[in-house]
Image (cartoon, grey):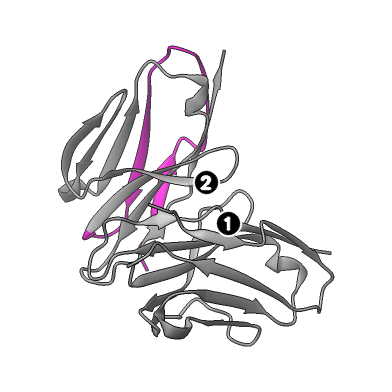
Amino acid sequence: EAGVAQSPRYKIIEKRQSVAFWCNPISGHATLYWYQQILGQGPKLLIQFQNNGVVDDSQLPKDRFSAERLKGVDSTLKIQPAKLEDSAVYLCASSPRDTAYGYTFGSGTRLTVV
Amino acid sequence: GIQVEQSPPDLILQEGANSTLRCNFSDSVNNLQWFHQNPWGQLINLFYIPSGTKQNGRLSATTVATERYSLLYISSSQTTDSGVYFCAVEPDSGTYKYIFGTGTRLKVLA
């Protein structure tokens, strides 16, 4: 079974630029999550999708962050414009529908904003 | 919201030693997971353990839900056990979203 795929692996941008991250979940997993992990901290949930609908985006800074999951499969997370404090690893995870089991993380995208 | 605290924050062990990592949570939870984040950043699930005790090889975990804590035991530690250990809790039934703790950074020396 293929795991959760994320790209790019690394990204360096200047502040005020925009950036996008891509995630392809495990086949058949209905629920998809984006987490932000700042160095030295635990992952923080940004947004949760069930199929292509948003379940929870209460922690997403909506003035600069946006996310979509077209057709209930792949997802993209965008930051525009980026700030220095957005430097972090962005992790995507997926799980089967209606269960908290089978939670699987991707390898993450490490973003550095300079 | 729920608070998830882990201790100790940092731990250095000699290979072969045993250790206990603790996770305290401030409210009742529906589920609890332990994860290992390896030095390359990959998060791997170790246990789903909302209550009771489970064992998998050299690792075991116990959750006492009524007292709001969970313990992860590592026996005969190996250098490959190095990394950060997180507990994560699902505060509300049916949300399937997890809140992560502060982590314990473990280094095992050869």
Q: Give the label on residue B42, or none.
A: 2
Name above or below for residue B65 compared with residue B104. below
The secondary element bearing badge 1 is classed as loop
As rendered, which of B110 and B29 lies closer to the eye? B110
Name above or below for residue A6 compared with residue B68. below
Question: Circle 2: is it few (<14), some (14-19), or many (20+) Cα within 10 Å?
Answer: some
Quick one: which residue is furthest to the front in this view? A1
B40 lies left or right of B43? right
B8 lies left or right of A108? left
Location of residue B71 in the rendering, given as x and y in whole percent from the top left corner:
30, 36
As rendered, which of B73 and A4 lies closer to the eye? A4
The secondary element bearing badge 2 is classed as loop
Which segment is the magenta one? B1-30
Examine the structure image and report whether residue A60 is included in the region drawn in magenta: no
Q: Which amino acid is tagged 1?
A: Gly
User: Which chain hosts label 2?
Assistant: B
Q: Is residue B108 visible?
A: yes
Residue visible at 23% across and 64% down? Answer: A99
Location of residue A12 in the rendering, given as x and y in whole percent from the top left corner:
79, 62
User: Which chain hosts label 1?
Assistant: A
Location of residue A102 in the rendering, given as x and y in whole percent from the top left corner:
30, 55
Q: Which amino acid is tagged 2?
A: Gln
B24 lies left or right of B101? left
Q: Quadrant of residue B29?
A: bottom left
- CA–CA distance in space, label 2 to label 1: 8 Å
Q: Give the label on residue A108, or none.
A: 1
Marks 2 and 1 in Cβ contact (< 8 Å) = yes
Image quarter of the C terminus of chain A: bottom right
